[in-house]
């Protein structure tokens, strides 16, 4: 990980706090170029600092991405959707078309499998509104409900593995329709283990 560059970003957090107190002087500046998104340029942060702050993975492999793509909420909505994740208070930058909100990053394991994780920006980015203007505060405190999001995610995994109809559709998306019974049962066991471990971790938060 580029710790030197990440250190530059961390030093700038103080500017984010100061900006939150100076709302009257904050305006949206030009959009800064970046790899995955155009980040609102405020607080004196340059494109490199914003790209590192918002895109660097920190190794928090919460759940396999192929699971997340296949999961549904208990109401039947796709879990990995803007509508679902905005419902928890997570933010999307203007012009963002992907399903992942601010601070949700992909992390690859040693086998090349993609996992979803969070970095610091998921919990430390704010959006302020006033007089028809929106201002993103890099390093500010989020209003998102992390606890509700992770609780619902655990419930979605538990539902997908415990209900035969739900599991059939889930396994078809994750493994493919030609997967044999052994592979499907292995997936089901992995889901049980994940839900158990995630539940224990949440109980100790």
Image (cartoon, helix red, strand yellow):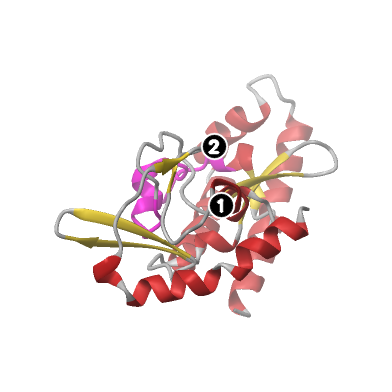
Describe the element under mark 1 as helix, strand or loop.
helix
Where residue 44 appears, as percent x and y from the top left, is: 47, 59
Extreme bottom residue here?
204
Q: Which mark is residue 36?
A: 2
Q: Is residue 109 above or below residue 169?
A: below
Q: Is residue 39 left or right of residue 188?
A: left
Asked if marks 1 and 2 touch (Cβ < 8 Å), the reply is: yes
Examine the rendering and report whether any part of residue 78 can be seen. Answer: yes
Extreme left residue here?
131
Q: Magenta region, mostly helix, strand or loop?
A: loop
Q: Quadrant of residue 20?
A: bottom left
Q: Nearer the viewer, residue 155 or 89?
A: 89
Q: Nearer the viewer, residue 194 or 145?
A: 145
Where residue 173 appears, as percent x and y from the top left, is: 58, 29
Q: Which mark is residue 9?
A: none
Residues packed near mark 1 inside 10 Å, few (<14), some (14 to 19) or many (20 plus): many
Q: Quadrant of residue 97?
A: top left
Q: Residue at x 70, y 56 (%)?
A: 5
Q: Nearer the viewer, residue 82 or 79?
A: 82
Q: Quadrant of the C terminus?
A: bottom right
Where residue 204 appears, as percent x and y from the top left, is: 63, 80
Of mark 1 and mark 2, the one earlier in the sequence is 2
- How far apart are the two marked residues, 1 and 2, measured between alpha carbons? 9 Å
Residues packed near mark 2 inside 10 Å, few (<14), some (14 to 19) or many (20 plus): few
Q: Residue at x 61, y 58 (%)?
A: 119
Q: Nearer the viewer, residue 167 or 205?
A: 205
Residue ID for mark 1: 54
Describe the element under mark 2 as helix, strand or loop.
loop
Range drawn in magenta: 68-91
Q: Is residue 11 left or right of residue 149?
A: right
Where residue 147 appears, as percent x and y from the top left, is: 48, 69
């Amino acid at each position: 990980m580029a710790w030197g560059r990440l250190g530059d970003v961390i030093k700038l957090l103080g500017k984010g706090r100061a900006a939150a107190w100076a709302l009257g002087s904050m305006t949206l500046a030009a959009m800064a170029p970046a790899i995955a998104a155009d980040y609102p340029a405020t607080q004196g942060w340059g494109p490199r600092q914003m790209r590192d702050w918002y895109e660097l993975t920190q190794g928090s492999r919460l759940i396999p991405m192929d699971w997340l793509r296949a999961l549904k909420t208990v109401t039947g909505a796709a879990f990995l959707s803007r509508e679902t994740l905005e419902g928890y208070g997570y933010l999307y930058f203007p012009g963002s078309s992907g399903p992942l909100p601010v601070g949700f990053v992909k992390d690859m394991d040693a086998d090349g499998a993609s996992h979803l994780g969070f970095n610091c920006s998921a919990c430390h980015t704010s959006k302020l509104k006033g007089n028809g203007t929106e201002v993103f505060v890099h390093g500010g405190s989020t209003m998102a409900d992390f606890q509700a999001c992770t609780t619902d995610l655990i419930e979605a995994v538990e539902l997908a593995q415990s209900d035969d109809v739900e599991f059939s559709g889930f396994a078809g998306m994750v493994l493919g329709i030609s997967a044999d019974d052994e592979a499907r049962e292995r997936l089901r066991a992995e889901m049980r283990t994940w839900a158990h471990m995630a539940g224990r971790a949440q109980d100790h938060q």
